[in-house]
Image (cartoon, rainbow, N blue to C red):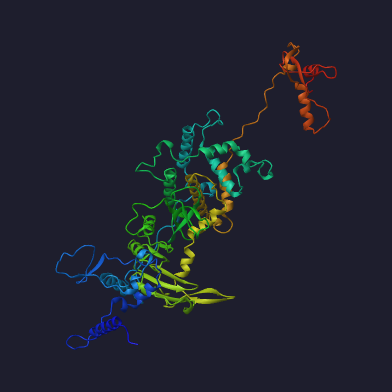
Amino acid sequence: MAAPEHLRRASAANAGSFLACASSDDGEDVEPQVEPWESDESVVEEVESETDDDREPYSEDNIVVSDDRSVSGSDSDDDDERISRPRVPARSRGSGRGGRGRRAIGGSRQNREQESDDSDEWREDWESVDRVDYSSRSGPTRVFAGEIDAITCFNLFFTEIVWQMLVINTNLNAVAKNAGQQGQRPWSPVSVEEMKTFFGLLILMGYMRFPRIKDYWQTSIPILKCCLSEVMNMTRFWQILRFFYVVDPANELSRDDPAYDKLQKVRPLIDLLQASFKTEYGLRREITIDEAMIPYKGRLGYKQYMKDKPTKWGIKVFILAEASTGYIYKFDIYTGKKATAGEHGLSTQIVLDLMEGMDGKGHILYTDNYYSSPTLFDLLWEKQIYCCGTVRPHRKEFPKQLRALPRKKDVHRGFYRYLSRRHLMACVWFDRRFVFFLSTAHAPRLEDGTIPTTKRKDGRNSVNLECPPLLEPYIANMRGVDRGDQMTALYNVGRRSKKPWRRIAFHLLEAAVLNAFIVERQLDPEREGAKRDFRSFRLELGVALVGNFSGKKRKGRKRQRPDKRLDASLPHLPISERKRGQCVCCSEKARKAKARKVTTGKNFRHEVYTRCTACDVHLCIAADRNCFHEYHTLSKF
């Protein structure tokens, strides 16, 4: 059966187009024209491996000029230049969501040349580079004569300035909220000694957790009979907790003010602790940056959710810590997107802010894939700060040759490949999955030119797998922040609260306690080992803060007053009234019988009309009982 006429015409047109590409007008053979996206196999593999979410839609704003220049949405200055839109292959025009097609694989000519230059810059060989040797002093900056205890190290961070600030602002807040007015419990100003006792009790409460604060004052629990209740009564503790404040209430700004700070309620404490953390300790060479979470589930604009953290919901804190000990050197509480995030993005700007003032010291910074990027590592290299960390393979300037990977089932465990660019080394390693690394602090091989190995489980057996030289240092030094979180989580002083600033303030207290413990262990060599743990340190610190303080009123002997009921000089005369009242003598007998759990079957309480004129109490005068006589003659009736 003959084909339809329109199909024959289309077939002839396609054949003519192919012949025109195969030969020129003068009969000479010409190579067929191949589009850039058809010749670059690595780019094709990369794009095919990407998900639809990673691909950018094709934009008509990018057009190519005949002299290899690219403009975006604007005409060229030279009117003679010929501007044309690049032809997009059919597969890149797919009908995506909302009618938006996928981006062209080749992109503009300038972008293709830039990608080619970046790929050519990465090489498989490695040239050693010179790095600055770390020579700064590490550890505590002060030297103490004599024995070091917990309270001495804690006072390095919670100085008298901090205590005075907390006391003054707490008393001002109590006055602003009319504490002790009519209908409320009497309020007395807090002193420095009492504020230290309050913080000491908070630390001791973290040592032994109860579901509610009032449970610590339960006298029915034998272990607590001579504990908190002997130091401060529950009413006074609740008062201090209620009116506790860090900033002067009169200096708070409204949300409409341009200078409003979301952390203004704790900003003075943050500034004081930040300064003391940096002046009292010198970091070692290996440092790390990671996030920590302050638990909070209330309503808050900058509350975050992190599925990989033990605390899923809360306030995120970016921390610069020492890798080996977990000492918190600097921190930044995340309060939302900032207008001045910088040209490099949020994650890069956070690292640059935390590393400010540490130039030229030769630190080695370990980060995870949230922060790592070639751009960041190049910026820190210029400041003589070296970096190492995992990286997301689609980061800008990451070598595309390392993205074109085989399938997992076709790769053996221990697969390792690296590329280098001047001082930067990028590599991929496969164990259970592909892991990508960047480093300016490590070479791709050992000094003798070999590749190290690491032990991994293979069923019941262990196997030695080839691995990058940076793997073991990264695993050992990336745990600094997590190590501190693990230590403070066991005995945390934080309590559930509707006020997020209070959770932040208690978290700062935990950071100071942790740093004090690290300082003590390094100042006292005998406590560097397992002889001194964090639990015993907290117990000693809490007891030292409480000291000899006692908020209980002294019990003295009551002043003996003469009992007028036994005074025979007074006119004790019985009179009869129209209104009845309970006999006080019978009521006292009934109370004593109930206390002795004596049941006689008789009603000891009687209502009578007789009242004593001198004592102004009702008393019985009857044939079977004479309470009037007993009341005025017997000392115990």
Question: Taking 307 as reference, is 280 above or below it?
Answer: above
Q: Which residue, as the protein is rendered here, is positioned at the far front?
A: 1
Quarter occupied by residue 120: bottom left
The one of 622 and 612 positioned closer to us in this rendering:
622
Q: Position of residue 148 (x, y in %)?
A: 53, 50
In which quadrant of the rendered image does the C terminus lie?
top right
The one of 177 and 200 positioned closer to us in this rendering:
177
Quarter occupied by residue 446: bottom left
Q: Position of residue 603 (x, y in %)?
A: 80, 26
Q: Residue at x 43, y 63 (%)?
A: 366
Q: Is residue 150 visible?
A: yes
In which quadrant of the rendered image does the N terminus lie?
bottom left
Q: Position of residue 238 (x, y in %)?
A: 56, 38
Relative to residue 35, is residue 522 drawn left or right?
Answer: right
Q: Is residue 522 visible?
A: no
Question: Taking 17 as reference, is 350 above or below it?
Answer: above
The mark total stands at 0
Relative to residue 584, is residue 407 drawn left or right?
Answer: left
Q: Which residue, as the protein is rendered here, is positioned at the far right?
A: 624
Q: Position of residue 513 (x, y in %)?
A: 51, 50
Question: Taking 359 as reference, is 429 above or below it?
Answer: below
Q: Residue at x 39, y 42 (%)?
A: 255
Question: Taking 585 as reference, is 80 above or below it?
Answer: below
